[in-house]
Image (cartoon, helix red, strand yellow):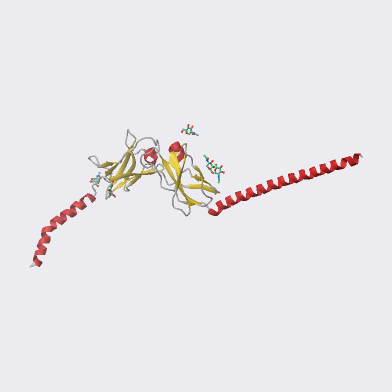
Amino acid sequence: MAIPVRPRLLAALAPTFLGCLLVQVAPAAGTPQKAFNLTWNSINFKTILEWKPKPMDYAYNVEISSGSKWKIKCFLITDTECDLTDETVQDVHLTYQARVLSVPRNNTYLEEPPFANAPDFLPYRDTKLGKPVIQHFKQVGKELNVTVEDSPTAVRRNGTFLTLRDVFGKDLSYTLHYQKESSSRAKPANTNTNNFTIPLEQAKGYCFTVQAVIRSRKDNQQSSQSNMECSDEWDSIMGETLIIVGAVVFVVIIFFILLSVYLCKCKKGRAGQQRKENSPLRSA
Ligand SMILES: *[C@@H]1O[C@H](CO)[C@@H](O)[C@H](O)[C@H]1NC(C)=O
Ligand SMILES: *[C@@H]1O[C@H](CO)[C@@H](O)[C@H](O)[C@H]1NC(C)=O
Ligand SMILES: *[C@@H]1O[C@H](CO)[C@@H](O)[C@H](O)[C@H]1NC(C)=O
Ligand SMILES: *[C@@H]1O[C@H](CO)[C@@H](O)[C@H](O)[C@H]1NC(C)=O
Ligand SMILES: *[C@@H]1O[C@H](CO)[C@@H](O)[C@H](O)[C@H]1NC(C)=O
């Protein structure tokens, strides 16, 4: 009884299935689809616009503007990203608009093609700070010095790339998180330059990371943390030992100098006394 029902049921459902299939397949057959999820991926002013979906048999044009005219930057691409660095570093204090147009591969269309707008992009405010690099560090006894590399950006002036410090000036600071190798609580220290001089509690090995910070920002204030570095406990202890040894040697030398001066005076004194004692005899 159930067996004859099934084919009939299938036959009845088939158009629905086909309909579903057609609805899903139809947009993939070459009609340009509107882009979505447009996101700026910008680090130290290298700026790439990304979006979705991968095009099926059509292409994308990407246009950018800083207020007046649209300028086409990526033309008939089948990628879902476009590098807009060259445009956005022209003036990092301007607000840029960008849009992604979905067009037939032959770029001929009668009506306006579907397009999507990216969020406004202001490089100075929106570019993310790259992970900092610790260039150099040195611990001697209870003093730790750390120098952070001044990373190059994608911003060019007179043919050279400006550094983060060149672009952000005093807006840019760095935070150091440091902790004794064994203990887990990290302490912060800040600098407005690229150098830290940290007075430590003990002449032991310390581990630390560095983070770039722009306090004037609301979002993307901080970079991710640099790789961790650890100062050599032995080095720092050697440093302290050397200082102590030096101090002891100094004290000992001073002691000997004082002692010899004292002994000299004693001798002279005694010699003088002897002379005084002897003089009457001589004169006599
Ligand atoms: C698009 O972005 C939204 C958030 O903006 C997210 O929830 C969604 O998963 C994204 N879609 C895709 C396909 O990645
Ligand atoms: C361009 O491509 C579209 C879709 O692929 C097609 O409908 C149209 O006829 C083409 N136009 C020309 C001029 O080739
Ligand atoms: C750390 O830097 C300061 C200032 O530049 C300098 O006087 C000091 O000798 C340095 N200390 C170490 C351990 O390098
Ligand atoms: C470099 O650029 C500045 C303006 O940013 C300009 O004043 C200066 O003359 C330029 N120097 C050279 C060597 O081109
Ligand atoms: C920072 O430290 C480096 C290396 O120790 C040194 O060359 C540089 O002059 C220092 N800069 C400042 C601003 O103190």
Q: Is residue 29 left or right of residue 81?
A: left
Q: Position of residue 19 (x, y in %)?
A: 15, 53
On the rendered structure, is 230 left or right of 244?
Answer: left
Residue 97 in the image: state x and y as whole percent: 32, 38
Residue 44 in picture, x, y percent from top left: 41, 43
The reply to whether residue 163 is visible in this rendering is no
The residue most toward the left is 1
Residue at image location 20% in from the left, 52% down from the top = 24
Residue 266 in sight? yes
Q: Is residue 128 left or right of residue 235?
A: left
- Image quadrant for the C terminus? top right
Label total for image: 0
**Residue 239 image offset from top left, x and y in percent:** 58, 50
> Viewer-proximal residue, 149 or 199?
199
In the rendered view, does 4 fall on the left or right side of 73?
left
Please report the residue visible at 32 percent of the width from the left and 47 percent of the height from the top. 80
Q: Is residue 276 above or below residue 17?
A: above
